[in-house]
Amino acid sequence: MTQKQQPKALTLLLSATIALVSSGLTSQGAWAAGKFEAYSTSAEKAYAAQDYPEAEKNFLQALNESGKLEKGDKRPATTMYNLALVYQAEGKYKEAEEMFLKAKDAFVGFYGADHQRVGQVYLDMADLYVQQAGEDAKPELRAKAAENYKSAIAVFEKIYAQATGQAPAEEKKPEATETKPNTTADTGEKKDKEAKQAAAGKSSAQEAAQNLANAIRSLAGFYAENDEYTPAEPLYTRMLELDEFAYGNEDKQMVKDKAQVAEFYCVQGKYKPAIPLFQAAIDLSEKLNGADSEETATILYNFGGLQYDEGTFAEAEKMFKRAIKIFEKNNHDEKDVAMKSVALADVLDMQSKSEEAQGVYKKSIASLEKIEDPVALITCLKGYQKHLLIQSKKDEATKVGLRIKELKAEANKKSQE
């Protein structure tokens, strides 16, 4: 089937290639585990290569072998989860949903309902419903997505509360059927996790805040994309607070956060709270990403859009020019630069800088003619036609209008072929 989205990385929470401690297994168990590992490894390689049918086949074979593993082995739960991701990449939504639910039940059985792995499955199921709703436009799928995002947040809220001492830590669920190999593997996994946290300079509380912020960001983005701004706003506020605690105020994640929330306000026309967020994002991006980085340029360009909407055209011009200069310096996508330049030409026209605007339009048109993108070229030509009419250059505007008609006719002809 056609791939629907970029594949997610296979979970590292419970690697399907955990090293075995042979002394804890019977010879039959060791043989079954070896076959399970072989199929799992082949599946992971196929998934990485985006060969989803091969990944699906091998994960299914691994699950078939999992029935021969020692009782209490946790690896099949992760295999179910990974197979769900494969189904999702293939567009097999029903199968993906069923496998996610099986993986969730298995994780709950091993770790309890309020565990990070359970929360992650809720997030992935929500994303699955969003993806499917985008194609089918079914309200019930969007409702399911919201429900699962909320379930994920509830799980991560409890983990965060326990990590920060706001709630007593729950007793670890006894695992009487746990085998020696898995106990050893889990101990190693825990040590590896703690080592990585220490290397990153993060406490368990900071990691919990990060995970909760990610879940909240997902729900806020879901609401915003569906034009439900009222429930999204407090979520974005909480996300900023959590990420500042998790990362500190001088981290690249904070650049993304501030820019994202600023854009969220702009969409609603709430420019007052957006302005300081944009300014903070630019200052921080210049410091952390570099003054001439793509990240900085993108924020500058979006801030220019706000200035344009506010009617502060001189500031918008300044932002657009600087952003476009950076994009060109970094050999940014030529089509995107050309389309962004149309906004600059428009703001120049708004300030009666017609000669400069005409030069920008001509440069953009030349780029788009070379790229042979009729849709983008039509958009650019419409702006140029408007520019010519403002200058009372009716004959030239008429010629541009004829070119637009030609492009539309060509596009219609191609669509019918």
Image: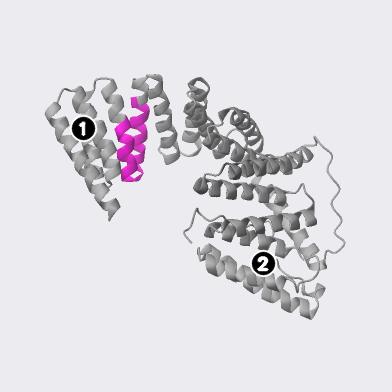
Quick one: which residue is furthest to the bottom in this view? 27
What whole-number distance in Å separates the C-alpha atoms at marks 2 and 1? 59 Å
Q: Position of residue 58 (x, y in %)?
A: 60, 71
Please identify the quadrant where the C terminus is shown. Answer: bottom left
| Amino acid type at image mark 1 | Gly
| Vertical order, 56 against 409 (above or below) | below
Q: Which residue is mark 2?
A: 17
Near-viewer residue (23 or 215): 215
Residues in magenta?
317-343
The circle on residue 359 is 1
| Secondary structure category for the residue under label 2 | loop
Residue drawn at the location 72% of the way across and 50% of the way down: 118
Q: Quadrant of residue 85?
A: bottom right
Residue drawn at the location 75% of the way across and 63% of the way down: 74
| Vertical order, 86 against 345 (above or below) | below
Q: Position of residue 350 (x, y in %)?
A: 29, 21
Residue 320 on the magenta span: yes
